[in-house]
Amino acid sequence: MLTAEITRLFSHEEARWRLATFEAQPLQELLGRSRALKREGHGSAISYSRKVFIPLTQLCRDVCGYCTFAQSPRQVRKPFLSPEDVLSIARAGEKMGCREALFTLGDKPELRYEAAREALRELGFATTMDYLVAVCALVLKETSLLPHVNAGVMSEEELVRLRRVSVSQGIMLETISPRLGERGGAHFGSPDKDPQLRMAMIAAAGRQRIPFTSGILIGIGETRLERIQSLLALKNLHERYGHLQEIIIQNFRAKPDTRFANSREPDIDDLLWSAAVARHIFGAAMNIQVPPNLSYSDFPELLDSGINDWGGISPVTADHVNPEAPWPEIAQLQSATERAGCTLQQRLAIYPSYVANAGKWLDRALMHKVLREVDADGFVREDGWMPGSLERLPTPPPAVRADRGIDELLQRAAAGSRLSEGDIVRLFSARSGDVDVICSAADELRARMNGAIVRYVVNRNINYTNVCSYRCSFCAFSKGKTSETLRGKPYDLALDEVARRAREAWDRGATEVCMQGGINPSYTGEKYLELLRVVKAEVPGMHVHAFSPLEISQGASTLGIGTRRYLEILRDAGLGSLPGTAAEILDDEVRASICPDKLNTREWLDVIAAAHEVGLRTTSTIMFGHIEHPASWARHLLHLRDLQERTGGITEFVPLPFVHMEAPMSLRGQSRIGPTWREVRLMHAVSRLVLNPLITNIQASWVKLGEAGLAALLQSGVNDLGGTLMNESISRAAGTQHGQEFAPEQMEALIETLGRRPQQRTTLYGPVSRERYEASFGVPALAELIMTPFGSRTSVRDGLASF
């Protein structure tokens, strides 16, 4: 059936029509259109995988006319690499920053050679496939490398076995033409090069949801028409299963001591034409690769064809299939890529779009290893820095511009125009020098809107309960009644303790208490009113910034009244403003995974809008760096911008980098490990630009980022350092190491080192009184005089553990 389908669809009219269309165009015109398609699908990015090449065996039952990889038993030192050999190669690659272990081997050598069968018996395996599965598992266990497997023609059952121990697999179709298997053809005597077998295997990989690599080999006796037929056959399978993550256009190179030693090689124009044709056939989104080492010094010209990937480049091992063609140095590759106006980005063996849907394309046991390695775009993280850690900030890469098109977006944003989702995603995808340009534009806008003033508020966090009936997968703070073995015990503060903490904060110069807690199933709307009243009774002048939209919704529901009415009751009882928390990501596809029982996007926005309508102002937040992507960030920012345009009630925007250390979904291997430093810079800068001129205050979280992070972000559009906090506990529960409090004198010293003017503010950005300002500098930091939740004086260490 497959053969009939191939013949019906691709043998005749469509391929002939496409060939005529492509050949009617001048080459430069064809290349120009393919480059435009590449830019549409991949922007300025050119990817590559840093890998080691592990030739598990060079024995093969096939005898292709152009191959020097396959050897006979008398030509090899031993039939198979030993497990120790494999680990030695993998560990050498690991030291050089490789992420991929490429297993390449001959087809089923045990079916041809007794030496192969005996070697397998000595290793304890019946087949090459059994051994391959075992060594892939070994590399996964002992190293950080991720296997990609090119093991020839396999059965569907074998593909499934390998899916459990590899992140991707592949086989080159080479050609759909069966005539190359006839006498004198390139594939004569090679049963595993039968196009029907290969197409059947590629289809089976699709059924099993395996990220898969395939492509064509040009110059082995096929015609241009047959190249197009081969590409169309692959496209048909991809349209059915969506599993072809890349298409390789590989050019034949004549090798001594082969039947095709004197055959003519494709020239550079033929290679460029074939790669451009592949781009046109597969469209903007497909990853099209041409190996640079097979074009020698001409390799930079390959970018003219619209490719977006250089393939695997090894700083450790040779290309064992083409040993006469050394890899370009990665620095050389980067230089050539940047000269072409592009940025070189390292990827894993599984491409970014498949990482983005890892639950579908990866075995569950592999997800954790993959997600730890990538950024929000699915490329390899540029550095080892993580929010909440004490690691030094990464040194930025050389400032090379690649996307001059963003300059027009920056001008529109600075003028106050509403950017589209695609525009914002483009800004978030910036790399290298383009990041610096975006941050500079944001800081220029900050100076225009806020001058040299950097504000902060003296406040105290009062998290009155960590008991919560919700199970948000990112939250390490909330606890259930059975959570005593987890980090921190469940607690519910008494009202007199809440009052005591409010009084202590006032005595230390605070103008605000920020009160939030878990969604305690025993709480009603009346409980939140009690918490509010006890603070206002104890300290009438204290601004109470309290209750997330989720708490407001729950409180109103328990009282059987509407959200707006409940907000009016809270306002009249003394509530000053609401924290715009529980927003996480305003993208319901993401919320369905990380907080399915929380308010959805529309419900969250409705609560915030209702608060604004009754005269209560709110902050706004985003939590980023877990499972979401730049499109999610763009949607979130646009929701906030549109809401602010309607109501005008948002005081500031606060990006909150995800701290992964103790987060449940991170411990389960279901999330990334927080944003990269590049992404943190971009989030603050891009939000300044996108929200202009409607939200004028962009705040950085010292709890997540530390002093060095704050200093850098103050030059990237940030004008506010938030609150001193006194008792930060939510981020600390997640694993941040930046402490509980950032005292006013520290805030001001940091601000002044950057030549800016510190200004203490109220919650609503008004001036503080001289009395309040002086009080905030007159009492020792709370870490020196800390109370337990029950009011008894204790040691600093024990006191910290109690929150």
Image (tube, rainbow, N blue to C red):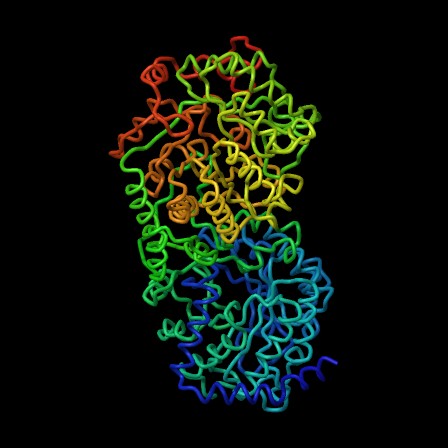
Say which quarter of the image contains residue 154.
bottom right
547 relative to 262 in the view: left or right: right
Say which quarter of the image contains residue 741.
top left
Of residue 588 and residue 738, the one placed in the foreground of this image is 588
Say which quarter of the image contains residue 763.
top left
208 relative to 516 in the view: left or right: right
Q: Is residue 179 above or below residue 306?
A: below
**What is the x, y in percent for residue 45?**
43, 62
State the quadrant of the C terminus.
Answer: top right
State the quadrant of the N terminus.
Answer: bottom right
Of residue 622 and residue 372, the one placed in the foreground of this image is 622
Q: Residue at x 34, y 14 (%)?
A: 771
**What is the x, y in percent for residue 493?**
60, 17
Q: Residue at x 50, y 77 (%)?
A: 280
**What is the x, y in percent for residue 546?**
53, 26
The furthest residue to the top: 792
Q: Residue at x 66, y 54 (%)?
A: 363
Q: Is residue 398 above or below residue 541?
A: below
Report the number of numbered marks: 0
**What is the x, y in percent for residue 373?**
52, 49
Q: Is residue 724 above or below residue 689?
A: above
The furthest residue to the left: 755
